Image (tube, grey):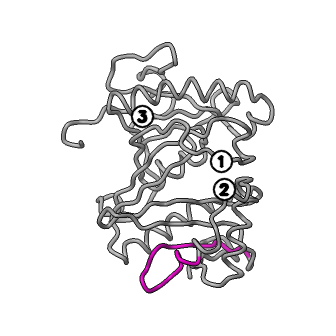
C-alpha cells in the first residue's frame, strides 16, 4: 500500500473479485471500451496470482473509491515488463494521479529486479507526454500507426496510433530520485534554434520540434476535422523520424505563448553509442 501527497489517496494491488470487477468497469468508464475491448475477469484473476507471479494489477483509491487502474504484464524478455493500461477517471486527471501510480509501480518493479518497462500511449496527449518523458524519464522509440482496433468512445473515431515507449529503471536518472527532467533550452529558445517539422517539411537535421494539440480531448469535442488532420500530419512526421531515420524523443516542451498553450516534442537523432 502506498500513500501519495494527495490527502486520502492510496495505491494497492487488487486481489478480490469485487476489486477486479471494478477494474473492468473502470476500463469502460475511462476509455469507453465495449465488452470486447475490456480485459476479462478470468484473465485478470490469472494476472493477480501470487504463485507464480504473472502480473501486477494496481488500483488508485481516493477515500476508498477506485479512481485509477494500472495493469502490468510479464514478458518473455528477461527483467522486462509491459505496462498495458494506465487510466484515471476524467474528473481526477489534474491531480497527477497517473504520475503517482507510475512512480509507485517503478518501486515495485525494482523489488522484483525488473529494470526495463515498455508501454504505448497516445502521441497527441500532451499531459501524458509531459508525465512520461519529462517526469518519469521515459524515451519514445517507435511510432505504431493503427496500433489498436477496438470500439471506444475516447478516440472519437480517430485512428488509434501509439508511441512505443521505454524506461530503463537501472539508469542513473532513476537510481537516484525521480524528478522532473528539464531540456537544455527553454521553449522560446528551442523555437528560435530548432526547426519545426511539418508534414510537407521534413528537414535533414539532428533535431526537430513537432507540435501537437494544446488539448486533444477538447479539440476532438470542438473540431474533430482538425484533430484528425493532426493525426495524419504527425503520423507522417513521426513515422519518418522515429521509424525511418532512427530518432527518439525524451523531452517535451509545454508552455504558454501569447495566452495559448503550445506543446512540442523534441525529436533527436540517435547517436551510435546509444543504439
Disc 1 and disc 2: Cα gap in Å? 6 Å
Give whichever of discs 3 and 2 has the lower sequence position: 2
Disc 3 and disc 2: Cα gap in Å? 41 Å
Side of 88 relative to 85 (left or right): right
Q: Position of residue 32 (x, y in %)?
A: 74, 53
Q: Position of residue 227 (x, y in %)?
A: 69, 29
Describe the element under mark 3 as helix, strand or loop.
Answer: loop
What residue lies at 53% left-to-right and 79% top-to-bottom? 48
Describe the element under mark 1 as helix, strand or loop.
Answer: loop
Q: Which residues are magenta?
A: 45-62
Q: How many marks?
A: 3
What residue lies at 50% left-to-right and 28% top-to-bottom? 210
Q: Which residue is mark 3?
A: 185
Q: Where is the N terminus found, in terms of image quarters?
A: bottom right
Instruction: Please tell me which residue lies in front, 177 or 124.
Output: 124
Eyeballing the image, is 266 above or below 237? below
Give whichever of discs 1 and 3 has the lower sequence position: 1
What residue lies at 44% left-to-right and 29% top-to-bottom? 239
Other-residue count near label 3 (Cα within 10 Å), few / some / many at <14 / 14–19 / ≥20: few
From the image, state whether disc 3 or disc 2 is nearer to you. Answer: 2
What residue lies at 60% left-to-right and 83% top-to-bottom? 15
- Residue 150, label in figure: 1
Furthest-top residue in view? 200
Eyeballing the image, is 236 above or below 150? above
Side of 151 relative to 136 (left or right): right
Q: Position of residue 26 (x, y in %)?
A: 72, 64
Side of 270 relative to 71 (left or right): left
Q: Which residue is mark 2?
A: 37
CB atoms of marks 1 and 2 within 8 Å: yes
Amino acid at each position: 500500500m502506498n500513500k501519495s501527497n494527495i490527502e486520502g489517496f492510496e495505491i494497492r494491488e487488487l486481489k478480490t473479485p469485487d476489486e477486479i470487477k471494478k477494474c473492468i468497469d473502470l476500463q469502460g468508464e475511462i476509455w469507453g471500451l465495449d465488452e470486447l475491448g475490456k480485459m476479462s475477469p478470468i484473465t485478470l484473476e490469472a494476472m493477480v496470482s501470487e504463485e507464480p507471479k504473472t502480473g501486477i494489477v494496481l488500483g488508485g483509491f481516493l477515500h476508498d473509491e477506485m479512481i485509477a487502474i494500472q495493469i502490468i504484464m510479464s514478458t518473455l524478455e528477461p527483467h522486462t515488463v509491459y505496462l498495458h493500461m494506465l487510466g484515471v477517471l476524467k474528473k481526477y486527471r489534474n491531480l497527477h494521479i497517473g504520475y503517482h501510480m507510475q512512480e509507485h509501480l517503478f518501486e515495485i518493479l525494482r523489488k522484483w529486479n525488473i529494470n526495463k518497462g515498455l508501454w504505448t500511449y497516445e502521441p497527441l496527449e500532451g499531459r501524458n507526454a509531459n508525465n512520461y518523458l519529462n517526469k518519469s524519464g521515459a524515451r519514445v522509440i517507435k511510432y505504431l500507426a493503427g496500433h489498436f482496433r477496438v470500439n471506444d468512445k475516447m478516440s472519437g473515431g480517430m485512428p488509434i496510433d501509439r508511441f512505443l515507449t521505454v524506461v530503463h529503471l537501472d539508469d542513473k536518472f532513476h537510481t537516484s530520485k525521480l524528478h522532473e527532467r528539464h531540456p537544455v533550452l527553454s521553449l522560446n529558445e528551442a523555437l528560435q534554434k530548432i526547426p519545426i517539422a511539418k508534414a510537407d517539411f521534413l528537414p535533414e537535421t539532428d533535431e526537430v520540434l513537432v507540435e501537437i494539440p494544446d488539448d486533444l480531448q477538447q479539440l476532438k469535442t470542438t473540431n474533430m476535422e482538425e484533430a484528425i488532420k493532426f493525426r495524419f500530419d504527425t503520423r507522417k512526421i513521426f513515422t519518418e523520424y522515429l521509424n525511418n531515420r532512427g530518432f527518439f524523443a525524451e523531452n517535451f516542451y509545454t508552455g504558454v505563448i501569447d495566452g495559448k498553450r503550445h506543446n512540442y516534442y523534441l525529436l533527436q537523432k540517435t547517436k551510435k553509442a546509444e543504439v
